[in-house]
Image (spheres, rainbow, N blue to C red):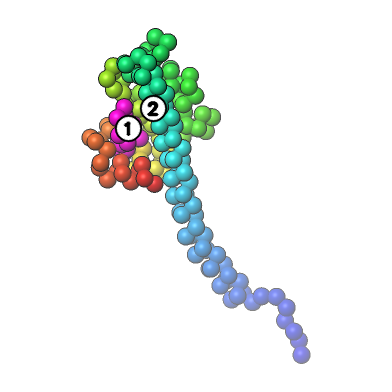
Amino acid sequence: MKINKGFTLLELLIVIAILAIIIAIAIPNYSRYVVRAQRVEVRNALQTIAQQIDQNYRVTRDYSKLANGDTLSNATISSWGFANVPSSANKRYEISLKTVTATGYILQAQAFGKQAQRDRDCAYFFYNQSGTKMASKTATPPNGGRDETSLECWSK
């Protein structure tokens, strides 16, 4: 009696089909996880910048001025190391001051490169002097931060 060793073609096809199903489920889930992790990174950067601006405000009582007398600008944010997130050549977000006055400011983080392609719903993050967290598909911040996009983008 001859003993066959190895796998039949049918067994190999079944294994390939099972692997294809697992991969089809795993890759999109992993991609969503990566996008959410990168959102956390930019949200943390916005809040850190806001803390530094608020520290200056406690001294100057003017959001547009720094404690050393200089004017708050995008160059200031860059000097703090937060112009890009992450602060390497592989930036995923560009952070800037959308507006700044003596009584308030709005920080903006704009998705860049692959992040902009992958995360169109949360392409822009905003944070203001009162701690309002906003997000949008466009460069226009929504009113109040209580819209569905803002809540979704800042919570996940």
Residue at (43, 21) in percent of width and height = 77
Q: As shown in the figure, which amino acid type bears the numbered disc 1?
A: Gly
Q: Residue furthest front?
A: 58
Residue 114 in sight here:
no
Q: CA distance from mark 1 to mark 2?
A: 8 Å
Percent position of residue 45, x then y: 44, 32
Q: Earlier in the sequence, mark 1 or mark 2?
A: 2
Contact (Cβ within 8 Å) of mark 1 with mark 2: yes
Q: Secondary structure at mark 2?
A: helix
- Residue 134 to residue 103: above or below: below
Q: Which residues are magenta?
A: 125-139
Foreground residue, 23 or 63? 63
- Residue 153 to residue 16: above or below: above
Q: As shown in the figure, which amino acid type bears the numbered disc 2?
A: Ala
Dot 2 crowding, Cα within 10 Å, few <14, some 14–19, many 20+: many
Instruction: Inspect the magenta stretch and tell me whether residue 131 lies in it.
Output: yes
Q: Residue furthest bottom?
A: 1
Residue at (43, 45) in percent of width and height = 36
Which circle marks residue 131 in the picture? 1
Dot 1 crowding, Cα within 10 Å, few <14, some 14–19, many 20+: few
Q: Secondary structure at mark 1?
A: loop
Percent position of residue 88, x then y: 54, 29
Foreground residue, 109 or 102? 102
Q: Is residue 140 left or right of residue 119?
A: left
Which image quadrant: the N terminus?
bottom right
Instruction: Inspect the magenta stretch and tell me whether residue 45 lies in it.
Output: no
Residue 152 in sight here:
yes
Which circle marks residue 50 in the picture? 2
Residue at (52, 60) in percent of width and height = 23
